[in-house]
């Protein structure tokens, strides 16, 4: 998709503050520091629309972006960071559930993991919860530039086996060299009908 407009609309924690559900929506989720902000910026060809975090786990807001007046991108707060205060951690689940349950226009969730670390328990939980809300997960493994060709190939097969899916359903990504950008966009376009 050619990006002509990518603008921040608002941050919210409560469903009543979400923008109207009047366009297809794609959410982005992942553990803190996984490379979620970098991935969104890379998809949109923007350097710093989404701030690349110096303080992992700090953001606990649901951030809405308008893409081309055609689509919403939603940056969900990162999870799984050990140093976050307990009350912030405890607030994550209900906030995400409130979000998933209140966005009928949400069709896809880009679930971002680190290709070297693979799938953690909290990733699995979210990936398995998504279809119950009518949301298709797109499985993306970032920082692929950190592995050589041989290792990348093997990781993709191992990860596909772990999920019980075809290896073509596993997207390897890199914000440094733009590996996987086209494949993520293709899945987004398929799932949102754009
Ligand atoms: P977030 O907390 O998930 O939003 O992660 P950020 O996008 O802020 O990235 C966390 C750190 O990982 C930063 O130091 C980034 O420069 C680095 N990073 C993000 N994506 C990549 C990638 O594809 N390759 C490499 N090598 N580093 C990355």
Image (cartoon, rainbow, N blue to C red):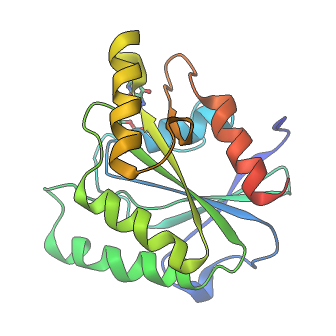
Q: In percent of the image, x 61 and y 82: which residue is there?
A: 17
| Vertical relation: 33 (above or below) 132 | above
- Image coords of residue 64 (percent x, y): 63, 62
Q: Can you tell me which quadrant of the image ligand 1 is in? A: top left
Q: In percent of the image, x 15 and y 68: which residue is there?
A: 85
The answer to whether residue 148 of the structure is visible from this angle is no
How many numbered marks appear? 0
- Image coords of residue 192 (percent x, y): 77, 59
Q: Quadrant of residue 1?
A: top right
| Vertical relation: 3 (above or below) 99 | above
The answer to whether residue 152 of the structure is visible from this angle is yes
Q: In percent of the image, x 43 and y 37: which residue is there?
A: 141
Residue closer to the observer: 75 or 185: 185
- Image coords of residue 153 (percent x, y): 41, 20
Q: In percent of the image, x 15 and y 73: which residue is there?
A: 86
From this viewpoint, which residue is outermost toward the bottom? 16
Left/right placement of residue 158 relative to residue 142 reads left
């Amino acid at each position: 998709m050619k990006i002509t407009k990518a603008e921040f609309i608002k941050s919210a924690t409560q469903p009543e503050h979400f923008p109207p559900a009047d366009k297809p929506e794609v959410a982005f989720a992942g553990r803190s520091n996984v490379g979620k902000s970098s991935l969104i910026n890379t998809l949109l060809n923007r350097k710093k629309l989404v701030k690349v975090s110096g303080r992992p786990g700090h953001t606990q807001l649901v951030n809405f972006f308008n893409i081309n007046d055609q689509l919403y991108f939603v940056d969900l707060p990162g999870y799984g960071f050990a140093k976050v205060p307990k009350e912030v951690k405890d607030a994550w689940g209900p906030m995400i559930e409130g979000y998933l349950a209140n966005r009928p226009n949400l069709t896809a969730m880009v679930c971002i993991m680190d290709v070297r670390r693979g799938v953690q328990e909290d990733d699995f939980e979210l990936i398995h919860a998504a279809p119950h809300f009518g949301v298709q997960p797109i499985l993306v493994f970032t920082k692929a530039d950190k592995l050589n060709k041989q290792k990348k190939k093997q990781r993709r097969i191992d990860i596909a086996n772990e999920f019980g899916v075809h290896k073509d359903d596993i997207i390897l990504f890199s914000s440094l060299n733009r590996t996987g950008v086209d494949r993520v966009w293709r899945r987004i376009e398929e799932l949102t009908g754009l």
